[in-house]
Image (cartoon, helix red, strand yellow):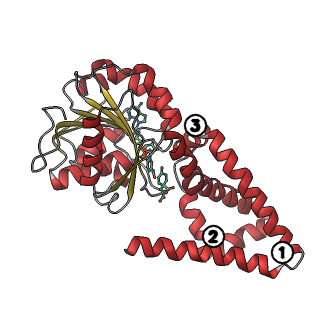
Amino acid sequence: MDDRIASSANPLFDTLVVIGPGLIGASVLHRARRDGTLARRLIAVDVNPVFRDRVRELGIADEVTGDAASAVADADCVMLCVPVGAMGEVAATVVPAMRSGAILTDTGSTKVAVIEAIKPSLRPDISYVPAHPMAGTEFSGPDAGFATLFDDRWCLLTPLQDVSSDSAVEAVETLWQRCGARTRTMAPEHHDRVCAIVSHLPHLLAFTICGTADDLADQTRSEVLDFAASGFRDFTRIAASDPIMWRDIFLSNREAILEMLARFMEDAQAMARAIRWDDSDYIVDRIERGRQIRRSLIGNHQA
Ligand SMILES: NC(=O)c1ccc[n+]([C@@H]2O[C@H](COP(=O)([O-])OP(=O)(O)OC[C@H]3O[C@@H](n4cnc5c(N)ncnc54)[C@H](O)[C@@H]3O)[C@@H](O)[C@H]2O)c1
Ligand SMILES: O=C(O)C(=O)C[C@]1(C(=O)O)C=C[C@@H](O)C=C1
């Protein structure tokens, strides 16, 4: 581990720079402020002046700036929390300005495309550790952040042999554990397929079902909205998520999402056939599997 990265009783880093203090970045900053175990000095960088003012008002960073290159000059760790489609451009701005031995990490929801976008900017004396906290809400921007967002959630790390030093992987893992998360390491391609089914496809379905309901005839639409109980409402919660973030996720994990969508559509067709032909056993079997998954998820969470 770099000698500027302190031991466990002390803050992990001297200076941590969060680029894009929205839901995820601001949550990391809140946690860092609350516990004092992540970094002695916190710097937030955002392109949006309104968000910079909000971060200042929230008091979750020691410095707030729009100048990413000067902000990272003395950082031990730079965390990119911008939309997936902006990662490459931001890395190209900050990596040349980072000090030798520093760590670069990101929180992007897709990994293969983000790694491809960042890799061309890397230097041999900078370690890059891609990561993805599996936690979020439908809200975005600095006001959405809160210190406990990552408690008992997974953070998936997809280190790369050629650019992620062991000490940097250990430091990023410790950072997420100090944010309250459990960590797991996997290959970027595997990450993208897993997230396509457990995160990206559910969002695609939620956006689509809300659009379909909205396209229905006027009277039905108002009934949908008036009488929507928890089933439809559960879809609308995730359908309220940020359009830019989700556009970037869909376009950057295209193949895995299309593969999972095709499998889903085959299964939905099978369900349609079972309904058409009164195949009660098939219908009950599928619903029973859904129930079991829900029970095992809740059981795991409580455990
Ligand atoms: N929202 C979630 O549930 C969630 C969960 C895990 C990971 N992620 C990933 O984490 C990243 C951040 O997501 P979020 O939900 O916090 O987004 P967000 O929209 O809440 O925040 C993004 C921030 O980045 C800023 N920004 C955009 N371009 C920038 C640039 N070029 N330079 C500096 N700042 C810039 C925005 O102004 C905003 O403050 C994304 O890559 C997303 O895929 C999101
Ligand atoms: O809980 C939510 O609202 C989320 O959308 C969080 C969620 C998810 O799908 O689980 C969304 C995107 C991420 O990359 C990680 C987590």
Question: What is the x, y in percent for residue 92?
Answer: 40, 21
Residue 44 visible in the picture: no
Q: Earlier in the sequence, mark 3 or mark 1?
A: 3
Question: What is the x, y in percent for residue 43?
Answer: 23, 36
In the depicted structure, whether residue 37 falls above or below residue 292: above
Q: Are marks 3 and 1 in contact (CB under 8 Å)?
A: no
Residue at the spot 22% in from the left edge and 21% down from the top edge? 100
Q: Which mark is residue 252?
A: 3
Marks 2, 1: nearer the viewer? 1
Question: What is the x, y in percent for residue 208?
Answer: 69, 55
Q: Which residue is nearer to you in this view: 225 or 282?
A: 282
Question: Disc 1 residue type?
Answer: Ile
In the visual, does 85 lie left or right of 33? right
Tell me the distance, in whole angstroms, between the alpha carbons under discs 2 and 1.
21 Å
Q: Which residue is mark 1?
A: 275
Q: Which mark is residue 98?
A: none
Residue at the spot 38% in from the left edge and 60% down from the top edge? 153
Q: Secondary structure at mark 2?
A: helix
Residue at the spot 76% in from the left edge and 63% down from the top edge? 268
Quadrant location, ligand no. 1:
top left
Residue 51 visible in the picture: yes
Q: Which residue is mark 2?
A: 232
Q: Which residue is nearer to you in this view: 273 or 2?
A: 2
Q: Which residue is nearer to you in this view: 289 or 92?
A: 289
Question: What is the x, y in percent for residue 90?
Answer: 40, 27
